[in-house]
Image (cartoon, rainbow, N blue to C red):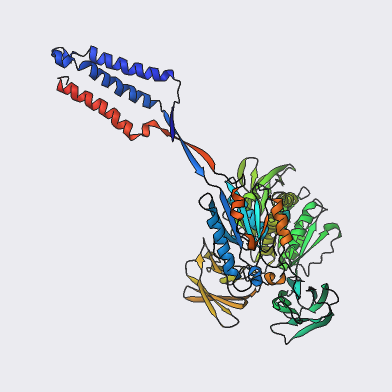
């Protein structure tokens, strides 16, 4: 550690402090009459006492200048060697007896060979990095690209010497890692596991289907079947409805006429019953087949009563309409139709929500239509554009009133309101929403109904206002919303520009439409789940709401939930309280169909809410049984590394240690500390002044 003294003032200030101490000492001791009768022996102490006073005063004056002591620290960081090991089922499926323990011994031997020259960072990976080192090979999904990205994010700007990936190269989620766009200046070594020889096998590669169908409609599933080394064999493709194989819906024999065989079969099924329906797609076993685990796939289709219909009624064509329609129909439960007021026949019989864009307009009143919507309890959403007659809009709805509108517009951005609680949305989007491009909003004075809730306020330039940009209200069992600006198509484009997806924009529109279009549920206690079908590797979550007699959200009493699977096994949980509601992360549960029932007690009354969900099996790791060493070789070469077979791990450590990249890095860090904080300096100055005081006292100076 090296230390240097730095000053915050010019160097001549130091001389001024020394002069100040000297003048003070000379004036004190040359003009002081206390020692006029002192003996010669006593007067010999006067110069020493003057020196002590000079040192004390000068030191204090120097400290008042705020000098800094700059310390330089040196730290040697060993290179990191990152070892990431595949923890998925496909690796275990390829193991012979004893292979698992042998691989663990080889990995440990590799770590030992590196010795103390490097620092080992060891992980497991499945669909993401796992902070464990002992594999159990239970992972259901493999995402090598995500693993590389996680490693890159964790060790950016650190001294990483090499990355070692021990995997079979089989991935079933994410992009092809060999063509990853991650820019790393770190060599990647791949340890190739598994067998690349295609065994005799028939399997269902994948089943394509919609997750939602509508009752009494037909829907199509497509089953992709492949076979290896099975030429001349015969199998049967079967589709069963419900659990088991008693309800056969489709059957077709398939003749395998090639060593590498592939066929795609489309099956049309009827959606007869409402709810989550299970379908089993299977191919019959062939002789000497490697594995039958990939002969069966189960799919789940949620059958709904019918799509909710959203009418986009506009004064004229506008890019907002396309953006809205795409966001609405991103949710398969909704169907959006665009119509224009000039050609609208007034039919709203099957409509669940009407979104007015640019209406009411000049000479285009919608008062009669709006009254009809209110009579039929069909919610409405007004989007203000440059064509909107703002005065008429203020008259027919009560949420937002605009006075003093002159036709001029403001560019306004969004401010997310913290008080909004009509529905929940992903709060991680808040910062992005407030960065969205501005909308064109009418200039004027805005007022909002006291019973309305503001989702977004207006930000005009750099000024945060309480003017509503997007507000909603439910009054007299009728829901209305007003967005006081046009140009939301730019929000959608900005979302894609920033994130390469439309998730934030879709979340705003979908949640708003869902709130407005859903029928009023006046139950005091209700439990909601994000979806009805979960994968077995997903956590199960619940949200619950409790309302008092004034229909205000409360969460004073405790709430619990009982979850029961189709085998009768019970799981009991207590909800966690949030600001004014309840939430629960139940973690992962076994595969099966579940019923849940939650309850709480309020004002002496027991309130209940119930529902169901399904957890489906993930069989992605059984579909692909042949290791992909070609991909591993290409991946290693792309990052200036090398692919190593699992039986050649010995010697890999020495090969890596010889690389120029694997070298310690010397880091310098600097720390500045005010000299006045040094305690030992305080005691030195105190000793100067204390010794001077003692000598003056001893020689009669006091």
* Residue located farthest toward the bottom when viewing the structure as drawn: 246
Question: What is the count of numbered marks?
Answer: 0
**In which quadrant of the rendered image does the N terminus lie?**
top left
Q: Is residue 85 left or right of residue 277?
A: left
Q: Position of residue 417 (x, y in %)?
A: 59, 52
- The residue shown at (16%, 23%) is 697
Q: Is residue 197 left or right of residue 341?
A: left
Q: Quadrant of residue 627?
A: bottom right
Looking at the image, residue 38 lies above or below residue 182: above
Looking at the image, residue 272 lies above or below residue 520: below
Q: Position of residue 87 (x, y in %)?
A: 61, 65
Question: Quick check: can you spot residue 396?
Answer: no
Looking at the image, residue 470 lies above or below residue 139: above
Q: Position of residue 309 (x, y in %)?
A: 76, 67
Q: Is residue 668 left or right of residue 373?
A: left
- The residue shown at (27%, 19%) is 51
**In which quadrant of the rendered image does the C terminus lie?**
top left
Looking at the image, residue 282 lies above or below residue 446: below
Q: Position of residue 651 (x, y in %)?
A: 60, 56
Q: Which residue is at the front of the view, 577 or 118?
A: 118
Q: Is residue 185 left or right of residue 630?
A: left
Q: Which residue is at the front of the view, 530 or 333?
A: 530
Q: Quadrant of residue 40?
A: top left
């Amino acid at each position: 550690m090296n230390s240097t003294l730095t000053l915050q003032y010019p160097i001549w200030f130091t001389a001024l402090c020394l002069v100040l101490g000297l003048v003070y000492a000379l004036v004190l001791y040359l003009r002081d009459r206390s020692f006029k009768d002192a003996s010669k022996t006593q007067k010999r102490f006067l110069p020493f006492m003057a020196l002590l006073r000079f040192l004390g005063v000068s030191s204090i004056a120097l400290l008042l200048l705020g000098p800094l002591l700059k310390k330089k620290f040196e730290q040697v960081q060993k290179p990191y060697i990152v070892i990431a090991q595949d923890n998925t089922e496909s690796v275990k499926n390829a193991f012979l007896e004893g292979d698992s323990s042998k691989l663990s011994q080889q990995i440990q031997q590799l770590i030992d060979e590196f010795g103390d020259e490097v620092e080992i960072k060891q992980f497991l990976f499945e669909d993401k990095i796992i902070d464990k080192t002992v594999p159990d090979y239970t992972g259901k999904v493999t995402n090598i690209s995500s693993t590389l990205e996680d490693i890159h994010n964790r060790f950016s700007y650190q001294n990483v010497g090499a990355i070692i990936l021990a995997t079979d190269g089989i991935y079933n989620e994410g992009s092809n890692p060999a063509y990853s766009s991650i820019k790393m200046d770190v060599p990647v070594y791949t340890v190739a596991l598994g067998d690349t020889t295609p065994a005799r096998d028939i399997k269902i590669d994948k089943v394509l289907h919609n997750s939602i169908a509508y009752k009494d409609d037909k829907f199509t599933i497509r089953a992709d079947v492949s076979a290896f080394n099975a030429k001349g064999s015969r199998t049967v493709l079967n589709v069963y409805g419900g659990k088991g194989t008693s309800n056969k819906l489709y059957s077709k024999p398939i003749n395998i006429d090639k060593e590498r065989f592939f066929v795609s079969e489309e099956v049309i099924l009827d959606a007869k019953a409402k709810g989550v329906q299970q379908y089993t797609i299977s191919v019959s076993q062939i002789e000497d087949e490697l594995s039958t685990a990939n002969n069966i796939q189960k799919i789940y289709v949620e059958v709904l009563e019918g799509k909710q219909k959203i009418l986009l009624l506009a004064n004229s064509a506008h890019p907002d309409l396309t953006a809205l329609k795409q966001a609405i129909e991103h949710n398969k439960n909704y169907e959006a139709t665009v119509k224009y007021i000039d050609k609208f026949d007034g039919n709203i019989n099957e409509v669940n929500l009407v979104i007015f864009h640019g209406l009411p307009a000049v000479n285009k009143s919608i008062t009669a239509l709006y009254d009809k919507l209110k009579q039929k309890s069909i919610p409405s959403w007004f989007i203000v554009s440059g064509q909107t007659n703002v005065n008429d809009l203020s008259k027919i709805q009560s949420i937002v009133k605009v006075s003093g509108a002159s036709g001029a517009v403001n560019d306004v951005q969004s401010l997310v309101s913290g008080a909004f609680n009509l529905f929940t949305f992903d709060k991680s989007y808040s910062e992005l929403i407030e960065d969205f491009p501005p909308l064109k909003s009418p200039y004027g004075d805005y007022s909002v109904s006291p019973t309305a809730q503001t989702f977004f306020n207006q930000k005009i330039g750099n000024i945060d206002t309480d003017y509503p940009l997007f507000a909603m209200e439910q009054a007299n069992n009728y829901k209305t919303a007003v967005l006081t600006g046009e140009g939301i198509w730019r929000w959608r484009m900005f979302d894609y520009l920033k994130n390469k997806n439309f998730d934030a924009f879709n979340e705003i529109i979908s949640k708003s439409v869902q709130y407005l279009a859903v029928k009023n549920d006046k139950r005091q206690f209700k439990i909601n789940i994000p979806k009805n079908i979960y994968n077995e590797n997903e956590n199960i979550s619940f949200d619950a709401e409790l309302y008092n007699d004034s229909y205000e959200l409360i969460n004073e009493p405790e709430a619990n939930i009982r979850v029961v699977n189709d085998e009768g096994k019970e799981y009991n949980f207590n909800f966690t309280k949030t600001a004014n509601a309840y939430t629960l992360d139940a973690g992962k549960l076994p595969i099966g169909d579940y019923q849940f029932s939650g309850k709480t007690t309020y004002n002496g009354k027991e309130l209940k809410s119930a529902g169901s969900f399904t957890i489906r099996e993930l069989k992605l790791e059984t579909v692909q049984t042949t290791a992909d060493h070609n991909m591993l070789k290409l991946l290693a070469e792309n990052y200036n590394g090398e692919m190593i077979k699992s039986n050649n791990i010995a010697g890999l450590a020495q090969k890596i240690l010889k690389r120029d990249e694997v070298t310690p890095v010397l880091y310098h860090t600097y720390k500045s500390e005010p000299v006045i904080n040094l305690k030992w300096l305080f005691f030195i100055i105190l000793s100067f002044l204390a010794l001077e005081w003692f000598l003056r006292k001893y020689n009669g100076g006091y």
